Amino acid sequence: MPRTLVTSALLYANGPLHFGHIAGCYLPSDIYTRALRMAGDEVLAVSGSDDHGVAITLAAETAGEEPAAYVARWHAKMRETFAALDIQYDIVSGTSSCPPHADLSREFFELLNQNGYLVRRAADQLYCESDKRFLADRYIEGTCYECGYEAARGDECPNCGTWIDPLKLKNPKSKLSGETPVRRSTTHWYLDLPKLRDEKIGAWIKEHSWKSNVAAFIENLLKDVPERAITRDMEWGVKLPSSVGEAGDGKVLYVWFDAPIGYISFTKELMEERGTPDAWKDWWQGEDTNLVHFIGKDNIPFHCLVFPSMLYGTKDGYVLPAEVPANEFYHLKGGKFSTSGGNAFDIQAFVDSYGVDATRFYLCSSMPETADSEFSMELFIGTANSSLADTIGNLAQRVLKFIGKNAEGVIPEVHEDHREEMDRIILTECGTLEDPVEHIRQFRFRRAAEAITQNAAAGNRFVDMMAPWTLRKEDPVKALSSLATLCEWLSWTARWMAPVMPSKAQQLWTMLGQEGSIHDQLAPGLPEAATWRTLTPGTPLGEVTALFPKLELPEGEA
RNA sequence: GGCGGUGUAGCUCAGUCGGUUAGAGCAGCGGAAUCAUAAUCCGCGUGUCGGGGGUUCGAAUCCCUCCACCGCUACCA
């Protein structure tokens, strides 16, 4: 059985999730996971938060909190947002709270070191004598040596955009103490990416087939691969392994190094909870695993170059990613979704107003798959009404209500004399059918959304062709056969909807009088004449209600 | 400044390893039907494929250049 390990970008625990994160990474991973499971694949879905890093400590200090408490707050918020959107993972953990994470990160460090992929070097950095610590670039402010701007940050000048070397900054000041720091030498470890590239990863990247927008991004990547520092002088983070001795005192692993290892440590944590502590190896070191990283485009270098280099460099049998279906960015009316308040809106409130499945469907149909795209309230309302209420919802309504009035509210039986004809009409003559699951498998989420609607439209065509309201008088048996056929069609519609719109699919399934979870149904490709009818005639329908309400554009929106 | 993206029908976008009359959905117009949340079905698209130049038998699709809009700039998918 195909085994797929799905990861979703670790969210930096420094702000709320917004529609950009959702449409770019978390929703596609959830839809993908659900679709593969319905197709019968074995899937494990892992995500969590990235809790370390200077930005966290800085923000926590500003907020007057300890980093751990600060991170926990955003982590909880993230879980709420996932719940609001019906986004499910086997585990959502965090790099600061996951028990095996620190040890596993140190193991990576040691293996890479043993295998000769780490370089140790001394360099000068700014040190604050009053705080007795080295200052990360972001903790430093000073006068830009290029343009003279007085509030340049230690990493970049906001005025002229120069990438600042903090050692050259004029009048450097610590943002924390206000003191003038001094130069002091410190030792750091660097990941030897050039060596890893030349030895293995460069060739691997070249022969790998990437999603087209990812391929464009990677092309330039290999030309200039620097060694990258993987340690920092600070407290918040994963301490270095004791094997490096005093040289590691006061240092932690740089956040980018331990973050992706989180995918693995979270899997470990999950398997320990399940009482199968070694099972994580099947997923991460099993040859038959398809590793799929869902990320945004800004994470491409990490997931296509750096993390694979780390995995390979351990020489410990880790699989390399099979797919990195990175999305581009999703914007709000041309502006960027802001994590710092501003124009970001409350996802929970939005879902409460318009419905979780309509929201998921629209995000799916407008996903930034191959290029940046944007959220439009007007298009959201339009899509929800025309695709969901008018096409899918109305199909269910007109068929099931008709059965309620004219066929005693039970699933009718298709008569042998009509079966073949009706199979032919619905399966081939009402339009070209496309399999949403197959599109999802190929990471064509927009087209999957379109396919769900179009397949339902074929059902509407069948209704009009059969005109059961006329047939009822002329040939009642044929009328019942057409309605039986339409019930089967609705059951397939529910299956097609399920990965994208889990709760509405379930609602439709229940309206059809079916028991149990729609998500336990298998959806193996498109319906075929010989096997596609699965419902039991005579089954009473459930209560028939409007599946999708019509939505209205709020005042002042356009 | 650097890097990158986008510019195709009113709107949102497909299509582009060069090759028949450039496509879809939505909106719009006309018609049919009346089971249904006035929901459906059928028919209707001559658009300088941002401008200019080049390569070619042939370019929306490759190259150069210009214009417009936008994003990123090191960790916010």
Image: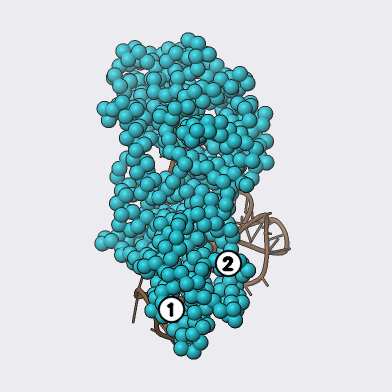
Chain colours: A cyan, B brown
Which of the two residues, A451 or A40, is positioned nearer the viewer here? Answer: A40
Is A144 displayed left or right of A450 in the figure?
A: left
For badge 1, the amino acid type reads Ala
Label 1 to label 2: alpha-carbon separation: 22 Å
Residue at point 55% right, 57% down? A522
Neighbours of disc 2 within 10 Å: few (<14), some (14-19), many (20+): some
Does residue A303 lie above or below A99 as drawn?
below
Which of the two residues, A269 or A371, is positioned nearer the viewer here? Answer: A269
Is A86 displayed left or right of A471 in the figure?
A: left
Place of residue A334 in the rendered image (x, y in percent of width and height, measured from the top left): 39, 52
Residue at point 50% right, 25% down? A105
What chain is tagged by disc 2? A
For badge 2, the amino acid type reads Trp
Place of residue A60 in the rendered image (x, y in percent of width and height, measured from the top left): 31, 29
Does residue A100 lie above or below A76 as drawn?
above
Which of the two residues, A159 or A196, is positioned nearer the viewer here? Answer: A196
Q: Nearer the viewer, mark 1 or mark 2?
A: 1
| Farthest bottom residue in view | A474
Is A68 displayed left or right of A193 in the figure?
A: left
Residue at point 58% right, 69% down? A432
Which of the two residues, A473 or A347, is positioned nearer the viewer here? Answer: A473
Place of residue B17 in the rendered image (x, y in percent of width and height, measured from the top left): 67, 54
Q: Considering the image in quadrants, where does the C terminus of chain A appear?
A: bottom left
Have a look at marks 1 and 2 and say if they share a chain: yes
Disc 1, SS: loop
Can residue A338 be seen in this snapshot?
no
| Farthest front residue in view | A538
> Which residue carries the number 1 mark?
A407
Residue at point 58% right, 71% down? A427
Can residue A45 be seen in this snapshot?
yes
**Numbered mark located on residue A532 in the image:** 2
Disc 2, SS: loop
